[in-house]
Image (tube, rainbow, N blue to C red):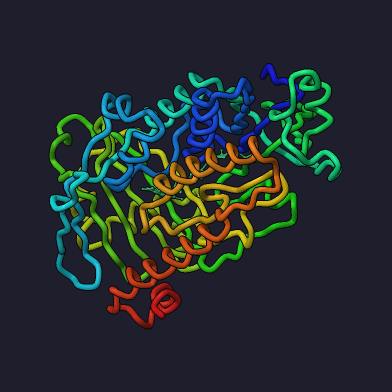
Amino acid sequence: MNDLKPHYDVVILGGGPAGLAAAIAIRTANINSHTNTNTSVLVVERQAPGQERLGENCPPEIVLLLKQLGVAKEFHQDNHETCPGYASVWGRPTPGYNDFIVNPLGPSWRLNRTAFDQMLANKAESTGAQIAWSTRFIGSEPRSNSSTTNSSNNNSSNNNAANEHEKAAHTLLLKFGSQTHPQVVTAGFVIDATGSKARFARTLNIHKTIDDQLFATVRFAKLAEGSQGTSSKQIQLEATQDGWCYQTLLPEEKVVSMFVSEREIIPQLREGCHQGFDQALSSTTFIGPKADKLKLTDATYHSCAIYSGVLPTVEGHNWMAIGDAAMSFDPISAQGIYKGLSHGLMAGTKVKSWLENGDETTSKFSEQIQAQYKVYQKNRSHMYGLEQRWKDSDFWRRRIS
Ligand SMILES: Cc1cc2nc3c(=O)[nH]c(=O)nc-3n(C[C@H](O)[C@H](O)[C@H](O)COP(=O)(O)OP(=O)(O)OC[C@H]3O[C@@H](n4cnc5c(N)ncnc54)[C@H](O)[C@@H]3O)c2cc1C
């Protein structure tokens, strides 16, 4: 059972990279500020700590964000591994190689996701944020407009729990585990970091504009005794007639393989059809033979829909959406975790301004998101446009403009 207070200055819904980075940024700014306020921050995360998460490949630039979040040292102490570059069969039948040697920030990273998530959660808690694990946000009610301003910049005489509750902008319904009755918590400011479904924005009737929908099946496995050290540390990428696939080694002798297509095009990749996944991967010309050579144990499979989309507005009365909740990308971009951390830092700036100036402050965050989404669309078109071998297949026809 979570020990929740009735009111928090800031409630962050979702404890992925974006939500945890936001918690760190807000609490760190609060600790470093000269005001005597103690901004209370709650992160609500429906999963239990340590659960397997998707996404492990990060660009070299991630180290800059980790530095800003104050976790660079911890990151380098954990067992994440660098990645020398890409080996890809994309746009032609033979492999091409792209190395990171010319990037001054060094190579890209293959994360140990469990350690990475744990590092962010530890940092958030050490700065004073509370994390409610296994707790699901199930609904919200906006409060009256008379109670609009933040509660932390009021003088101490009226800064008591009752007043804070009265001045809260949002009422949130949270369910812990299999609890039947939701717990009510009020918040001065809400950050929607619930991932691509943007659960909080939905309750405000704000829905994403979706411009592409894919389906991915991912296999995580351990390399069996004798199979270790037999595969390259490059990220392997291969376009196929019906989509694309990806494989890379991970820390702790693990390997991740992924097939991305559309739900209707490769029905055997759908949830529960894992044999179909192994066959589809095996039939590819570049990754397939490499995958077949690996002796794997403890394989787990995950299937999910992937939406490329952006919210028409990512901020409003005492709330904002960040990370995948604000805009979600095709994993071909390998930008999702980086984006989550950078939005978390931006949330820190926005909340600081809200604490100091109230909700009147205009922010450029929405404009930045729309601009970032346009850049993403352009890059995605470029990437898919490089592959012209199957212009008539359903998958490529829909993506080559
Ligand atoms: C198959 C696949 C492969 C990918 N590979 C990569 C990769 O290699 N590199 C990369 O950078 N990105 C990758 N991504 C994208 C990346 O995973 C996301 O962009 C990134 O995790 C976004 O972070 P986030 O914090 O915004 O959202 P998320 O990581 O989705 O976190 C949202 C959190 O909110 C929680 N949540 C949701 N609803 C509720 C609720 N109602 N109540 C409470 N909590 C809730 C979820 O449990 C989750 O922990 C991949 C994505 C997919 C689907």
Which residue is at 13% across, 40% downward? 230
Q: Position of residue 398 (x, y in %)?
A: 45, 76
Which residue is at 15% across, 59% downward? 97
In this view, which residue lies farthest toward the bottom? 392
In the depicted structure, whether residue 217 falls above or below residue 64: below
In the depicted structure, whether residue 391 falls above or below residue 12: below
Q: Position of residue 227 (x, y in %)?
A: 17, 36
Name the quadrant of the N terminus.
top right
Q: Quadrant of residue 30?
A: top right
Of 52 and 32, which appears nearest the observer?
32
Of 298 and 49, which appears nearest the observer?
49
Name the quadrant of the C terminus.
bottom left
Which residue is at 72% across, 20% downward? 5
119 relative to 11 in the view: left or right:
left
Which residue is at 64% across, 40% downward? 354
The number of numbered badges drawn on the structure is: 0
In the depicted structure, whether residue 333 falls above or below residue 137: below
Q: Position of residue 219 (x, y in %)?
A: 37, 45
Q: Position of residue 330 (x, y in %)?
A: 43, 59
In the depicted structure, whether residue 70 falls above or below residue 290: above
